[in-house]
Image: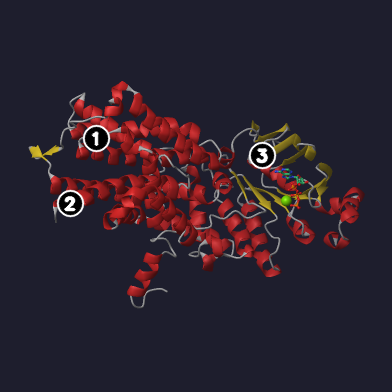
Amino acid sequence: MGGYLVTLATLISIQAIAACGLNVIVGYAGQISLGHAAFFGIGAYAAALLGTQAGFSFWTALPLAVALTAGVGLLLGAPSLRVREDFLAITTIGINFIVEAVFNNVEFFGGALGIGNIPRIRAFGGPVGGAGMLALCLGFLGLVVAACAGLVRCWAGLACFALREEETAAAGIGISPVRFKLLAFVIGSAMAGLGGALYAHYMRFIGAGDFAFPLSVSMLTMVVVGGIGTLWGPVLGAALIGLLPEVFRPLIDYRMLFYTTLLLLMIRFQPGGLLGDEGLARRLLRKAIPGGRR
Amino acid sequence: MSEPLLRLSGLTRRFGGLTALEAVDFAIGPGEILGLIGPNGAGKTVCFHLISGVLKPTAGEIHLEGRRIDGLPPHRIARLGIGRTFQIVKPFARLSALENVIASQGIERYGSLARIWSSWTNARERERARRRLAEAGLAEVAPRPAGVLPLGHLRRLEIARALAAARKLLLLDESFSGLRHEEIVPLETLVRRIRAAGVSVLLIEHNMRVAMGLCDRLVVLDHGRKIAEGPAAEVRRNPAVIEAYLGRRHAADAA
Ligand SMILES: Nc1ncnc2c1ncn2[C@@H]1O[C@H](COP(=O)(O)OP(=O)(O)OP(=O)(O)O)[C@@H](O)[C@H]1O
Ligand SMILES: [Mg+2]
């Protein structure tokens, strides 16, 4: 595999990690979030500052960055998730802009210059290079997907599903709407923080613009395209959204337009996503497996 | 008289200028089946919403075993042992019928952050849920998504899902409406079995045959006020009740 492909695959797996987190919030708990990039950014800035200012190694910084992102998710989610559903979209967009503005304007976060010289990740006594970094990111992605699979099977996940389907009925069987929405929000934020920490140490230079609103839109597109609420949908979505602009170079200048158009088309024609029950990928798979259920 | 299980006192609920429930008092004893009847728009469903915490009373109080519960959020009231069905059915549409019921079985866990991380996909939970579905006559639809089930099935799914919460009191809001006679009979058996297990039942029912056959006592609402209360046979002869029904509806229901 060429260096270019390794780079692309690494970035895709990092984004897939964050997209899995967004899927927990949007797909499992049914709470719209248009500010997921903010939490990706918080994880990245936390890891970057811990690596540069505090001199922590990646392995020490990682759990701290994830915990910090989850904590901020808890603080920002608690008031946001009490508002009506349609306001949540606006509130999360607001969170994204505020967080970006803080990174951009506060000296402590490097201001407009961002943070550079973030140390490479070291493992087995040496720096982790291109292929090693890809393996590491894929490993973390595997852990995140496994965590999602576990969440679906435990009572917390079932409570989120019930809430997503019918909030009043869920409350009627003892499920606290606020508590379980918040739980999903914190878990999703933690996963975004993990992706962000990997991103910072991979890029070794980050700026506020990396975590702006368009990234939130593209992450939501990944989840919707791949299959909202499915296990592998966000991974498939991240791969497709990551690859398409590379295949069609001219698209790069029109990214935002492309994502939003794709988002609207999917919601209109494939609301369950490619891996959803009636999704294109599901139907192709069914055709490809003879004797399989139609 | 011993302490009632549930007591409503001076219960009032207004929506702007409309008074849906006006100073209603009644109580349900332990192990009692109480019918709540009255013409359309009488305030029966509003009364259920107030008991289950979906709506807050404008005035008045609700006590469960002497403890005041109005003002508590719905999930807390459910955890205290009150299960309910919804007249306008509210299935978890993309979950299977079985998963709808399993979700209700987590009720003892949802309140504790430590107890929600274990798996619900085990044989024990499935078996428990299957039994409940079978009791409601839904054994054969267990694997189907609730969203595709017909209304008659969804009414029974509401009951199966309410059972886990209903440790003390089960509220049934027109659970038998739209069902055929042969579908109603097993549900009547189920309600009697629930009562035999020590659970009180408060049910809203338009079908007078069902209400008379099942209930120990009836409470009659009309225009948000309680107009009669007592043993079923007595209430049936009450002039105010006959007037309320005959005034706006045909006598068929009272027959
Ligand atoms: N959320 C609400 N907002 C405004 N008015 C309401 C609301 N809920 C109920 N009402 C009104 O309160 C009154 C009582 O309604 P309720 O649903 O309790 O009647 P009901 O006795 O259950 O009737 P039915 O037998 O038709 O189900 C009705 O006039 C209804 O329109
Ligand atoms: Mg009603």
Which secondary structure lies at badge 1? helix
Figure quadrant of the C terminus of chain A: bottom left
Q: Amino acid at mark 1?
A: Leu
| Cβ–Cβ under 8 Å for marks 3 and 1 | no
Q: Is residue B23 above or below residue A161?
A: above
Query: Crowdedness of circle 2 by 10 Å Cα count: few (<14), some, many (20+)?
Result: few
Query: Crowdedness of circle 1 by 10 Å Cα count: few (<14), some, many (20+)?
Result: many
> Which label is found at residue A4?
2
Figure quadrant of the N terminus of chain A: bottom left
Pointer 1 residue: A62
> Which label is found at residue B55?
3
Alpha carbon separation for disc pair 3 and 2? 59 Å
Which quadrant holds residue B8? top right
Report the front residue among A29 and B8.
A29
Instruction: Find residue B206 and report its horizontal and vertical position in percent.
Output: 77, 57
Horizontal side, residue A178 vs residue B25: left or right: left
Q: Residue at x 25, y 40 (%)?
A: A199
Q: Residue at x 48, y 44 (%)?
A: A31
Disc number lying in front (3 or 1): 1
Which chain is disc 3 placed on?
B
Alpha carbon separation for disc pair 3 and 1? 45 Å
Residue at the far bottom: name it: A291
Disc number lying in front (3 or 2): 2
Q: Is residue A228 visible?
A: no
Instruction: Find residue A148 and report its horizontal and vertical position in percent.
Output: 35, 49
| Cβ–Cβ under 8 Å for marks 3 and 2 | no
Which secondary structure lies at badge 2? helix
Query: Crowdedness of circle 3 by 10 Å Cα count: few (<14), some, many (20+)?
Result: some
Which quadrant holds residue B137? bottom right
